[in-house]
Image (spheres, rainbow, N blue to C red):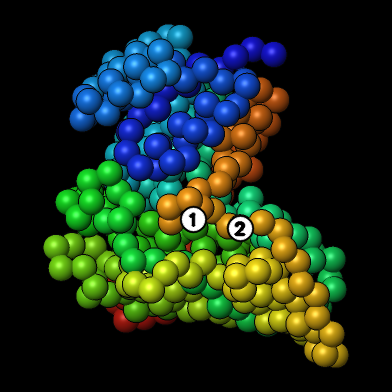
Amino acid sequence: MSILKIGVIGCGSIARHRHIPEYAANENVEIAAFCDIVEERAQEYAKQYNAIAYTSYEELLANEDIDAVSVCTPNSLHAPISIAALQAGKHVLCEKPMATSREEADAMIQAAEASGKKLMIAHNQRFVASHVKARSIIESGTLGKIYSFRTAFGHGGPENWSADGTDSWFFKKELAFIGAMGDLGVHKTDLMRYLIGEEFVEAAAFVEGSAKANSTVDDNAVCILKSESGIIGTLAASWAYNGGEDNSTVIYAENGILRLEDDPDYSLIIQYKNGSSERHSLGAIQSNEEGKQSDSRVVEYFVHSILENKTPPVCGQEGKKSLQVILAALESNETKQIVRI
């Protein structure tokens, strides 16, 4: 089996905590290059992994030895760098949200198709053990018809996580495009699409920027979503959950309630209508909190899709569908109307 040579573009926190250690743990990969506009960051990793350091992504992409790249930059650069990488003949694993518009997402998808290279978006929620089991339970019909859901992803904000702290690009609209909705909310739209096996067709939302003083993006949002078959539910994304992280999902169905990541001891609980219940401890969900950063499996699936020449589980089309829900929610907040997706 051939060894893939990987370049990591953007050496901030998501690269440090997820991409780099997951590549390093993968026997089919050699991390051959690092790129960051902060030269010391790229140099530090290059020294650690005996790789080449770049401050220009164009120069990294010109290196013909590189087979694939991770794009771990501010959101506004996801599309231009991913497109350039695909056009340079590299496979691309791009962080979420994949783009800042439908047009950018379409351009990324077209670049992947034209180049014949893989494009995967780094949505990790659908790989969490409790979520995988929940999907199989829902598909089995045990719970009957799904009526409603509530899902949330919130914590105290990226300043405790980002390499640049309170001066992070996360808070700057020209770099981030959106705040908590792009950082956290888009993960949950991807998860809910995966769990219920349907697309969302309408969105209504309130999106506020009230919790972070030096920010030009949203930090607190609540959306109401409706699926093709009429499943309705709420999605909350927030950087204002200051007492700890909430990454829970509850699904209300004909025969009971399914609780995911809603209990400290049991990652999946089913409370049946007849009074019986099931509890499953399936391991902790990935978290940004110190000491809770487990393998997201994103890199594993990306590498596998390249080596086996298979469509990645979160391909460009999937990434776009999850992005569109967030874009509709933002439009709803601006227009004060329900928006069709």
In percent of width and height, residue 97 lies at 41, 50
In the rendered structure, are the residues bearing label 1 and label 2 in contact, judged by CB atoms less than 8 Å apart?
yes
Q: Residue at 47% across / 20% down in the picture?
A: 31
Q: Residue furthest left?
A: 214
Q: Residue at 57% across / 43% down in the picture?
A: 295
Q: Which residue position is annotated with label 2? A: 284
Q: Residue furthest bottom?
A: 274
Q: Which residue position is annotated with label 1? A: 287
In front here: 44 or 1? 44
Quadrant of the drawing holding the N terminus: top right
Would you identify the image quadrant in which residue 151 lies? Answer: bottom right
Which element is circle 2 on?
A: loop
Q: Is residue 272 left or right of residue 94?
A: right
Q: Mark 2 is on which residue type?
A: Ala
In percent of width and height, residue 64 lies at 42, 9
Q: Residue at 82% across / 90% down in the picture?
A: 275
In percent of width and height, residue 67 lies at 50, 17
Which element is circle 1 on?
A: loop
Can the viewer see residue 111 in this picture?
no
In front here: 265 or 57? 265
Q: Is residue 187 left or right of residue 259?
A: left
Mark pair 1, 2: CA separation: 8 Å
Above/below status of 271 relative to 136: below
Can the viewer see residue 133 in this picture?
yes
Q: Mark 1 is on which residue type?
A: Ser
In percent of width and height, residue 317 lies at 54, 46
Q: Is residue 293 left or right of residue 162?
A: right
Above/below status of 118 relative to 283: above
Above/below status of 148 relative to 13: below
